[in-house]
Image (spheres, rainbow, N blue to C red):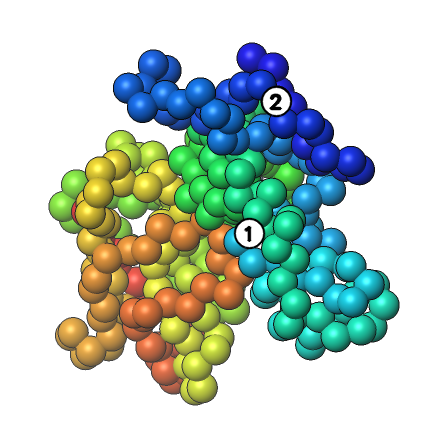
Amino acid sequence: MAKRRAAGEGAAPAPASTPRPRTEEAGDADEEETPTHFWIEPDAGSLDCAICLMPFEAEIYMCTNGHAACAPCCLRINRKCWGCGEPIGDVRCRPLENLLADMCTQCTFRKFGCCESVRYTERRAHEEACPRAPYGCPLGGGCSYRGLLLYQHLVDDHADAVSHLRTTGGSTKVTVRKREPFRVLVQPGTSRVYLLLNGGDVLGGRSLSLVCLGPRPQGDGVEISYKMEVRGGEPGALAVKGTAPCVRNLEGFQAKKFVFVPDADWGSSGTVTVSVRVC
Ligand SMILES: [Zn+2]
Ligand SMILES: [Zn+2]
Ligand SMILES: [Zn+2]
Ligand SMILES: [Zn+2]
C-alpha cells in the first residue's frame, strides 16, 4: 500500500485515491470514491509541537510570525511565543488544524505489535492507552529495559527488589520503608505489575496507595479490586479498599484513595508492614 508523505514544504497534490484507515474493514458498504484521508509517517516530526514534541491535537495556535504551539504549551509558556516572544494563544492555525484532521497515521508502537491506524490528532490519546505500548522499568537505577514483558523482566532481573502477591484470595505481607517512594509488587498467574506508592505529599505522615502498571484487565468495566491494611494499628483504622487504577505514566498522578500512615506509626525501624490483597 502506497504511503503519501504530506509533511514538509509544499502540499502534495490530492491523490486520485487514498488508503482508508487500516482498522476499517475492506469492502465496507459505504466505500466512497472521493479521497478522505492522507497518510503520514508516525515519525514525521515536522507536525509535532516544537515545545512538547508531541503530535499536534485538535487545537493549534500561532503567533503573528507563524510559530505554532499546542494549546497546553501556550499556557505553559505564559502565552509568549517560544520563537519570537510575541503573544501566542489567541489565534488558531486553522489551515493546519484542517489538514491534520484529515490525516491518518500508524501507532508509534507498530514495532511492538500494534497495527492500529489512527487519526493524526488522536494519536496521542491512542498511544496513552495503547495495549502494545512498551513499559519502562520502574526501578530505574541504570536499568534501561523497555518492552512488553515487564513482569518477566522484574522477576528475572530484579528478583530481590519485588514482592510477590498471592494470586487467589489471601493477602500478602509487604514491608514498606518510609523513605522508598514505591514498592514493586508482581502477581504470578495474572502477570500483573503493581506499585505500592508511598507518597510524601501529606503533612505529618505518608500516603500509601496502589496502582496497576499493567496489563490492564480485558473487557469493558472490568476492574481490579484491592484492600490494603497497615498492620499494628487499630484494626480497620489504617486500611483502604477500592479499585486499583491502571496507570502507565505516573507523572502528575494523584491517588484518589490512600491510607494515611502518621509519622509515629513508622516505628524506630522506619518501616511498616502492609497486608495487600488484590483480586
Ligand atoms: Zn506542545
Ligand atoms: Zn513567534
Ligand atoms: Zn497502538
Ligand atoms: Zn529493570
Toward the bottom, the furthest residue is: 204
Is 72 situated left or right of 161 in this image? right
User: Residue 68 or 91: which is nearer the viewer?
Assistant: 91
Q: Position of residue 246 (x, y in %)?
A: 35, 50
Q: Residue at 41%, 52% (x, y): give it.
A: 247
Is 225 situated left or right of 72 in this image? left
Q: Earlier in the sequence, mark 1 or mark 2?
A: 2
Q: Look at the picture and state if 43 lies above or below 197.
A: above
Is 230 situated left or right of 44 in this image? left
- Indicate which label's residue lies in the foreground, 1 or 2: 2
> Which residue does the numbered mark 2 point to in the structure image?
15
Q: Amino acid at mark 1?
A: Glu
Toward the right, the furthest residue is: 84
Q: Please rate how many residues cluster around mark 2, counting C-alpha atoms within 10 Å: few if below 14, some from 14 to 19, many from 20.
A: few
In the rendered image, which quarter contains the N terminus?
top right
> Which residue does the numbered mark 1 point to in the structure image?
57
Q: Amino acid at mark 2?
A: Pro
The reply to whether residue 102 is in sight is yes
Q: Please rate how many residues cluster around mark 1, counting C-alpha atoms within 10 Å: few if below 14, some from 14 to 19, many from 20.
A: many
